[in-house]
Amino acid sequence: MPFIPNTDAERREMLRAVGVKTIDDLFTDVPQANRFPTLDLPEPASEPEVMAEMRYLAEANSQAQASACFLGAGAYHHFIPAAVDHILSRGEFYTAYTPYQPEVSQGTLQSIFEFQTLIAALTGMEVANASHYDGATAAAEAAILALQQSRGRHRVVMSPVVHPHYRQTVHTYLQGAGVNFAGDETPENYAAFQTRSRVKYLAKCVDESTALVIVQYPNFIGEIEDLAPLAEIAHTAGALLAVVANPIALGLLKSPGEMGADIVLGEGQPLGIPLSFGGPYLGFFATRQSLLHKMSGRVAGETVDAQGRRGYVLTLAAREQHIKRERASSNICTNQALMALAASVYLSLMGNFGLRRVAELCYHHASYAAERLARIPGFQIVSRYPFFHEFVLRCPKSVSEINRHLLDQHEIIGGYDLGQDFPFLANHMLLAFTEMNSRDQIDALFDALSAEAL
């Protein structure tokens, strides 16, 4: 840049605020050889050479996608019907544009309305919005809604088996807002972790200052619990219950709405959206009619025009483009419209029976895998509750070492290293199984881990 407005005094003040003395201290984690201006870039290449390099990288990506994948922890490898990509690629839809104005095309508005209808039906709720960035963002918006609705309450209770990224995002959104968090403190061992994840423990954290209780269903380590008792406890205390739900699991399990949830949210990536090495993904958000006016994001409504013809329009726009910023329900203004369309197409193609069949396959594949892997000496299934399509496997050595062996020697993408988020779960792997994992793949994982045990 030709001009940097910061004075030397301002730079010193900013450095002091972040806890370092010099600009160079900000880059201590970057290896010296890779720091600017010595970038060590290769020599310029011709167009054919660049194309050859890109083809090589593309083939490497294809090889990774072709590997048997047992990695989940919030993003899952599911089958996507070809019609999903075909419809997304149509010129009428293929844009990253976020619809802001009520006069946006009727086709776009209808697709949003149908997405909302499908999500409301899937979650057992009454209304849904047009989506958020991702599931973690939706969790943070749920906390904001509850705090606004509670009129002075300042406590948010989160289960420690809510996805770590979701909990971190909620903390980040609400930092400096005077919110008192409870329930998700890091336990000292696995026994305490299991206890703190249960309804009885969370119930002790709920008091008259609690605005919201956040749980996950199935939880981060794949286990299924009845949430109805916790919903009753939260409501008795005057708090709301938000449930982070796996949308595929809802094809088989009782919906959170049936168990008394006030808000249901989650990651919509399993609904026809590829892993794509991390995104873009989709955050869905549904709630009760009584909370509609506090719900952030876009809402498409159905109406009639002057001639009585059915039409669609963006409505109840409580964002800062339309009202005063301090009165806005949220200052996050973008949704994942194209990803929401993918989820709508997927759900429409699968239907009730298809979604249930996918969920059943996930459940049965995970059960078969657990039965097989439990036989390997040195490995142990530690999940105690019924699980949906993920469970925890205790390993005889580090998860990173096992995963490296699985990938290098067997072209298998292993599970998630839980020690990254919970120090007491070092050498514990979270394995995920979907309809895409055949019995042959599960048997190959069994053989690979059996050899590793030797």
Image (spheres, grey):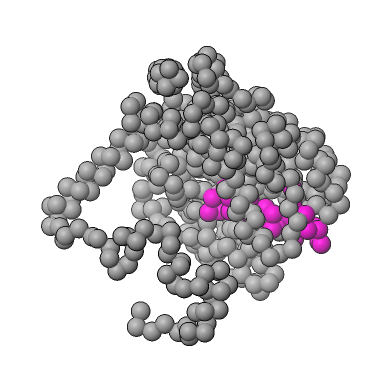
- Relative horizontal placement of residue 286, taking residue 440 as reference (left or right): right
Residue at left 52%, top 79%?
A: 12
Residue 369 in sight here: yes
Residue at left 64%, top 54%?
A: 170
The vertical placement of 126 against 397, above or below, is below
The vertical placement of 308 against 116, above or below, is below
Q: Position of residue 32 (x, y in %)?
A: 34, 61
Q: Which residues are magenta?
A: 130-157
The vertical placement of 128 against 417, above or below, is below
Classify the position of the C terminus by image quarter.
top left
Residue at left 78%, top 38%?
A: 201
Give the image quarter of residue 255: top right
Classify the position of the N terminus by image quarter.
bottom left
- Relative horizontal placement of residue 320, taking residue 150 as reference (left or right): left
- Relative horizontal placement of residue 30, taking residue 207 as reference (left or right): left
Relative to the observer, which residue lies in front, 224 or 269?
A: 224
The number of numbered badges drawn on the structure is: 0
Residue 418 in magenta stretch: no
Q: Position of residue 198 (x, y in %)?
A: 74, 34
- Relative horizontal placement of residue 112, taking residue 79 as reference (left or right): right
Residue at left 32%, top 60%?
A: 34
Q: Position of residue 99 (x, y in %)?
A: 50, 61
Q: Position of residue 374 (x, y in %)?
A: 54, 17
Relative to the observer, which residue lies in front, 305 or 15?
A: 15
Give the image quarter of residue 247: top right
Residue 152 in magenta stretch: yes
Residue 348 in sight here: no
